[in-house]
Image (cartoon, helix red, strand yellow):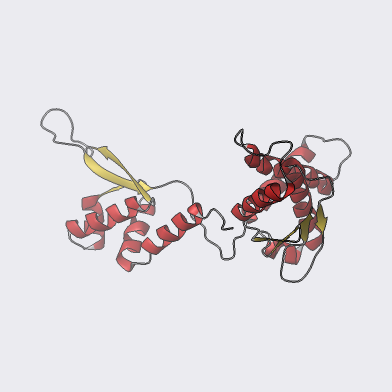
Amino acid sequence: MEPDTDSETDALAALAVLNEPLRRRVYEHVASSPGGEVSRDGVAAALGVARSVAVFHLDKLVDAGLLEVHYRRPPGRGGPGAGRPAKWYRRVPGEIAVSVPERHYDLAAELLARAIERAGEGAGDLDIEDLLADVARAHGHDLARELRSSPTEASAGEARPALLERLVRLLARHGYEPRLAGGVVTMANCPFHALAEQHRALVCHMNHELLSGLAEEAGLPPGSARLDPEPGRCCVTIVA
């Protein structure tokens, strides 16, 4: 089974667009513009290229989802006879990230931030590791609800092989590179690899709780996700 790679494909396509040197200069000029937006003529003048060349590269960046367009008249021009509004370009909010193999350090940071927020709110006598385990398990439950997104999926009497097949697809969409054999799901990739190398006990515990919540929400018995570290793969296996 192949992971859902639409977002990764889009990111790779966007980065490929930036591989052209002049186009990358156009993008950098727009991104660094003091006003946050530039016109076609402004790009052409700043980079010393023909207006048609600037337009070509700007439109390629828009098509790739790196820039967005809006229309307005230049400052000081308005009212009747001012002509049509001109195109202005600005960088699309957000970021593009591609890693091979897939990593999700942003998710680890988010889970840790949630745990720290709960600690600041005075969440009982739990220490930060226990709070991190709680939020990771809850996030796993949230992810597995994707399996129940339609009335035809995840019925209470669903056969275990079909459930495991869909579980594998879900894990693939989140970067684990799962392998199903003999009723055991092993994962060839750890989405938190570099963090796990430096903080193994904390990160593996977090990952175990996340996958435990995911497996339980998917309908597997408690304890199906097990800490089972081996070199070259994720520290958790899921056993049916």
**Percent position of residue 167, x then y:** 67, 49
**Percent position of residue 99, x then y:** 55, 63
**Percent position of residue 37, x then y:** 33, 46
Answer with the quarter of the image where residue 154 lies: top right
For this orientation, the residue located farthest to the top is 80
* Residue 49 placement, left or right of 116: left
Q: Residue at x 23, y 54 (%)?
A: 55
User: Is 179 situated above or below 59?
Assistant: below
Please name whichever residue, 17 or 67, is drawn nearer the observer in this view of the structure: 17
Q: Quadrant of the image for the N terminus?
A: bottom right
Q: Residue at x 36, y 61 (%)?
A: 17
User: Is 53 situated above or below 132?
Assistant: below
Q: Residue at x 33, y 50 (%)?
A: 62
Please name whichever residue, 156 or 231, is drawn nearer the observer in this view of the structure: 156
For this orientation, the residue located farthest to the left is 81
**Percent position of residue 36, x then y:** 37, 46
Please name whichever residue, 51 or 232, is drawn nearer the observer in this view of the structure: 232
Q: Residue at x 18, y 35 (%)?
A: 77
For this orientation, the residue located farthest to the right is 125
* Residue 103 placement, left or right of 26: right
Is residue 210 in sight in this rendering?
A: yes
Is residue 32 in sight in this rendering?
A: no
* Residue 47 placement, left or right of 157: left
Count of numbered circles in the view:
0
